[in-house]
Structure formats: structure tokens, C-alpha cells
Amino acid sequence: MLVVLVAGGTLWARSPEARLLGLAVLALLALTAFVLLALMSAQMQARVREDEQRLAELSATLEKRVAERTLALEEANEALSAFTYSVSHDLRAPLRAIHGFSQLLLEEHATGLSAQANGYLERVIAATLRMESLINDLLQYSRLGREPMAFAPVALDAEVAVALETLAVEIRSRAAVVRVHSPLPVVMGHPVLIAPVLQNLIGNALKFVAPGVHPEVAISAERREQLARVWIADNGIGIAPAHHERIFTVFERLHGSAAYPGTGIGLAIVRKAMERMHGHAGVDSAVGSGSRFWIELPFVG
Amino acid sequence: MSQTILLVEDNTDDAELFARSFHRTYANVSLPTVSDGEAARDYLAGNGPYADRSKFPLPNIVLLDVKLPRLSGFELLSWIRQHPQLRRLLVVMLTSSRESVDVRRAYDLGANSYLVKPIALADMQQLASALGLYWLKLNEAVPAGTTP
């Protein structure tokens, strides 16, 4: 700075030599400054290019890692589904034998067996039927992850009617009242996925009531922008908020088989089927005040 | 003329439970059983010991499981449908699998019907009874004689 001032000062000096000298120094300084700036700029540019290159490399590596992880996850999923399918499938043959021969014992040798022995056999048979339910539900759960599906508009009125038809015996034997607030919307999904969802939710509404109570189920729907939300409300025993998330996981049950039969897979099937259709399922409930289960799917019309 | 159903089943428990269920209603229908795909093929082709048709009559219906040792149910079905003399044989699948891929394949290969083995014995008895009624009594059999 001082040099600049001194050099600048000489410009107003008397002698032309001094003025020339001053000018030369100033020019030299300017040149140096210019060169320095150019160098700095080049260095900065080089650094920026370096950083950009590093970023591109990292980005490519990240993409590759994500792709590898996704593939690994898909393969694991596929393997798990295949395993569940194979296991559930191969468990049926011995189960048939256990049931069949126990039943034959009862039918053909009842008189030769004590009342207690008969009782034991009946419990064996009851257990095989429970196991059959379990295998069927597990198979259905695993199937949800495997079969490729294309989604299309599905009329929920028709699907609910089918579900109620399937549950007709249950509805009659419990003297249940089921109210459907038609018309229900048309949504984007697949009947093969929607059927078990409705069957499980309506079936649960019929099942989880206090002893002696007649189930009352109300099915309604509302539009929520791009989505349609279907409510399945009941007058059942209700679910404490602490359990609202847990109940949707596999094998989670809140009651023993003696109180309410079940495999603990129904709601897991609901959630998985909903996820496959890019929808959601949830519940609004409290103990003693019934439950309102809901599912959401893309609204079509 | 007495009728014959060939049961192709590798699981001895399943074979026995089906035989008992079936013979409850159709005691006079003969139910020879083979436990692998190759034996089934030999039986149908009349190879080796099976050449004696008085002892091993050609069946009216083949009850076929899918999972079999040596030759699978699907391979046997394929072979039957390509065989000049046997191609019209009535084949009813009787298997554990309810999977769409298996059902579709069976129908693609020309199975006449597809039945899933139930767990409960009472259901098996009902199935056997209905099977006999439909396929032996009601269904119009393939006419005997040389096939053009």
C-alpha cells in the first residue's frame, strides 16, 4: 500500500524522470496484482472442478450402492416369500395325516377308547384345524408379496357385497346388523388384494364383540382430495391406543385363542395388501367404545 | 364293466386317506396306486409287469398329484396328452397346491379338472364322493374303440 502511495505521489513530482519512475512502478504493481488475481482465479477454478468431479464420483457410487441394496432387498424378499410358501405348503401333508388318522380313530374305534381318550383325540383334531387356519393365512400373506399385479378401477360396492356374502354364515349366526352406506366409491386397486382386506376387517368387526352382544357394523366412505377413505365401524370391545400400531404386525394378538379365535395374521394381511396398492390402513378406537378401522386408496370416481 | 381309477400319489398317508374316503362310497371301483411319475407312465403304457391288462387294467380316470419323484405330475400330463392312444385319458389333478401358477399350468397342459386336497377328513370324504359321482356316473366317458 505504502509503495502505491509513494509511487502515486511521484506522479506529481517535479522531474519527469521521477514521474516516469513512479508510473513504471505503478504499472509493475498493477501487472503483479493482475497476475496474482489470475493465478488465484485459476486455482479456485481448479478446486471447484476437483470438487465437482468428487461429487460426481460419489453420486455415481451412491447410485450404484442404492441399486445394489435394492436388488439385495428384493432378492431377500423374494427368498422369504418363497420360503414361506414352501414351508406352508409342505406343512399341509403331515397335517392332513394327523387330522385324517385322528378322525379315523374317533370314527372307527370310539367304543374301544375311553371317554378321556376320545377327548384327547378331539383336542388333537381341533388343533389341526387351528393349524390349517394358520397355514392358510401365512400362505395368503406370503402370496401378497409375490404375484405380479396390474391395478385398475375397482367398484367397492361390489367388493363389499362379495365380502358380506363370504361372511354370510357368521353374520347370520351372530344375528349381526351390517349397514353399508352406498354408493361407495370406485378406487384404484386390485380385487385379489381388496377382497382379503374387506374380509378381514369386516370379519374382525363381527368377531371382537363382548359376549352376548350382537355385532353392529357400519361401512361408509368419504372423499379426501385424491384419496377415498373407507370406514368400517363396529360396536366391539375396542382397542387401546397403545396397541393401535402393534395389531397390524404379524402374529400380534391382544387376546388368547380361548377368548377370541384367530391367527394374528389378519391385520398384517390388511396392511401388506394396502401397501401393495400404495394405500394405507389405520384405526381409531378406545377400549369399550368400539373401533373404526379405515383404509385409503386412490379415488377414481 | 367295472371301472378303474389310477391314483398317482407318492405320499402313503394321503394315498391311504383318499382310498378309505373313496371306498366308503365306491367300494367296487378299483383304485390301483403308483407312487412315482415313471411308474405311472409304465402303468399307462403297459410296460413290463403292467403289460398284463387283466391285472393292471387301463384306468378310466387318472388322479394326479403334482409333486412326484422321477417324473412330475406336469411332465406326466404332458406325456399323456401327446400319446397317440392315451391322449384323451381323463386326468384330474389332486394336489396340495392352490397356487395360480400351478392351476394355470395344469389347465394349459390339458388337465380335465383340478382338485385341492382338503385337510379335514370329512371334506376329503365329500370330495371323493363328489369325484366318483361326477366323473364316473355323470360325465360322458371317452367312447371305446380306435381313435381316429
Image (cartoon, coloured by chain):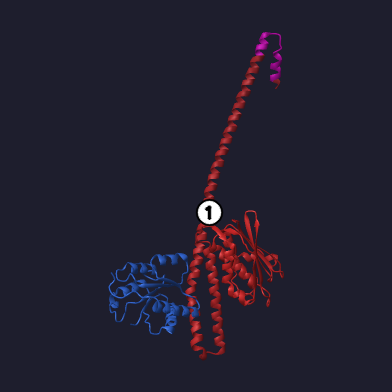
Chain colours: A red, B blue
Q: Is residue A184 magenta?
A: no
Going by the image, does A54 lie left or right of A20? left
Q: Which residue appears at 55% of the width and 58% of the height?
A: A153
Q: The N terminus of chain A lies in which quarter of the figure?
A: top right
Which chain does the residue under circle 1 lie in? Answer: A
Which residue occupies the foreground of this view, A80 or B102? B102
**Prevailing secondary structure class for the magenta stretch in the rendered image:** helix
Q: Quadrant of residue A125?
A: bottom right
Q: Quadrant of the C terminus of chain A?
A: bottom right
Q: In the image, what residue type sits under mark 1?
A: Thr
Residue at (58, 30) in percent of width and height: A42
Q: Residues within 10 Å of mark 1 (few under 14, many from 20)?
A: few
Horizontal arrangement in the rendering, residue B4 relative to residue A218 (left or right)? left
For the question of whether residue A169 can be seen, the reply is yes
Q: Which residues are magenta?
A: A3-21
Q: Name the outermost residue toward the bottom.
A: A111
Q: Can you name the residue that lies furthest to the top here?
A: A15
What residue sits right under mark 1 in the picture? Answer: A70
Nearer the observer, A73 or A208: A208
Question: How many numbered discs?
Answer: 1
| Residue A16 highlighted magenta (yes or no) | yes
Q: Secondary structure at mark 1?
A: helix
Q: Is residue A165 left or right of residue B63?
A: right
Q: Give x and y (percent) for residue B142.
A: 34, 74
Residues A275 and A50: in front is A275
Point out residue A232 in the picture as x, y percentages from the top left corner.
65, 65
Across and down, in percent, residue A240 comes to 70, 67
Q: Position of residue A116 (x, y in %)?
A: 57, 88
Q: Is residue A55 above or below residue A113?
A: above
Quarter of the image for residue B36 reads bottom left
* Quarter of image, res B37: bottom left
